[in-house]
């Protein structure tokens, strides 16, 4: 399988690239930052990488063309690139909305469209997996725009799946709970992470590999009857707290 991964320099994106490579697939990686891409290319020899600003819709079709040429076709697209700003509702600006919703929802839609055009013209099926979030159905303080963007991405996933199923193109999403990615851009206080772990029925926070395994499965034959699904990979976080007292 030949796979294009956006956000390939990030925690989840790089884990997805490694998961595909581990099963003999070839991967092309895209990220805004050159340094983590260089590390990925060193770890996975033969992996073409390219920097790109996913905020710019003009580059998206070219990214698919580049990956198609570099890999000799693209069978799967993993939309792992995204923004996670933590900002109180009353501080949100119009630019915040345009940027976050643009990257988190518009960009996956346009990349899906660009890949679909290539796949349909070639008479081939394919896979798209979007990285959504549990925040798309259950917001937290400081995530108003982020949560809205992921709710939009969930519907992009479903609408894309509906329209592309006839061409053998499956579109699904993974909705992670809290995942420890060690982000330098959005560092997380230890107390916050500990509180999330305590609230998670599985008793721990997630890892990028937890998400990558689900992404890889969604592109495998075992999930062939699945399209338009939003798969919660959250250790049960979306179910509610395991520490709620019993009724009596």
Image (spheres, rainbow, N blue to C red):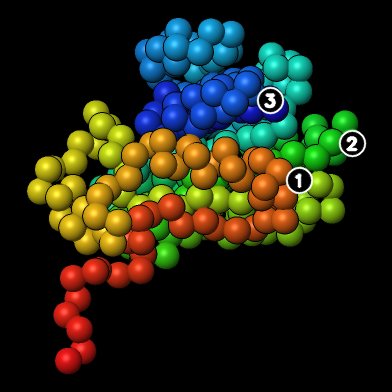
User: Which residue is identified by label 1?
Assistant: 169
User: Which residue is identified by label 3?
Assistant: 2
Q: In which quarter of the image is the N terminus?
A: top right
Q: Do the residues labelled 3 and 1 touch (CB within 8 Å)?
A: no
- Mark with earlier residue (2, 3): 3
- Asked whether residue 76 appears in the rendered view, the answer is yes
Q: Residue at x 77, y 51 (%)?
A: 164
Which quadrant of the view contains residue 219? Answer: top right
69 left or right, relative to 93 = right
> Under tag 3, what secondary structure?
strand
- Mark with earlier residue (3, 1): 3
- Asked whether residue 97 appears in the rendered view, the answer is no
Nearer the observer: mark 2 or 3; the answer is: 3
Q: Give coordinates of residue 49: x percent, y percent.
A: 54, 15
Which quadrant of the view contains residue 196? Answer: bottom left
Q: Quadrant of the C terminus?
A: bottom left
Task: Work out whether residue 176 or residue 109 is closer to the camera in this orientation and state it.
Answer: 176
Q: Which residue is drawn at 54% across and 58% down?
A: 230
> Under tag 1, what secondary structure?
strand
Image mark for residue 223: none
């Amino acid at each position: 399988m030949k796979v294009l991964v956006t956000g390939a320099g990030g925690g989840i994106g790089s884990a997805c690239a490694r998961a595909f490579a581990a099963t003999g697939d070839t991967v092309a990686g895209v990220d805004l930052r050159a340094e983590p891409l260089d590390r990925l290319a060193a770890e996975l020899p033969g992996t073409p990488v390219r920097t790109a600003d996913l905020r710019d819709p003009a580059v998206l079709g070219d990214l698919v063309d580049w990956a198609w040429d570099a890999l000799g076709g693209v069978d799967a697209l993993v939309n792992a690139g995204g923004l996670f700003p933590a900002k109180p509702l009353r501080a949100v600006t119009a630019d915040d909305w345009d940027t976050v919703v643009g990257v988190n929802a518009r960009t996956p839609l346009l990349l899906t469209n660009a890949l679909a055009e290539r796949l349909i013209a070639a008479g081939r099926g394919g896979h798209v997996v979007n990285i959504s979030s549990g925040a798309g159905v259950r917001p937290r303080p400081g995530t108003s725009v982020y949560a809205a963007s992921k709710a939009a991405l969930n519907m992009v996933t479903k609408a894309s799946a509906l329209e592309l199923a006839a061409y053998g193109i499956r579109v699904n999403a993974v909705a992670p709970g809290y995942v420890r990615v060690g982000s330098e851009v959005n560092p997380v206080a230890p107390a916050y992470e500990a509180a999330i772990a305590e609230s998670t029925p599985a008793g721990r926070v997630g890892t990028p590999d937890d998400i990558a395994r689900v992404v890889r499965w969604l592109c495998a034959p075992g999930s062939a009857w699945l399209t338009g699904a939003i798969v919660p990979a959250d250790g049960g976080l979306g179910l509610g707290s395991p520490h709620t007292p019993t009724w009596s």
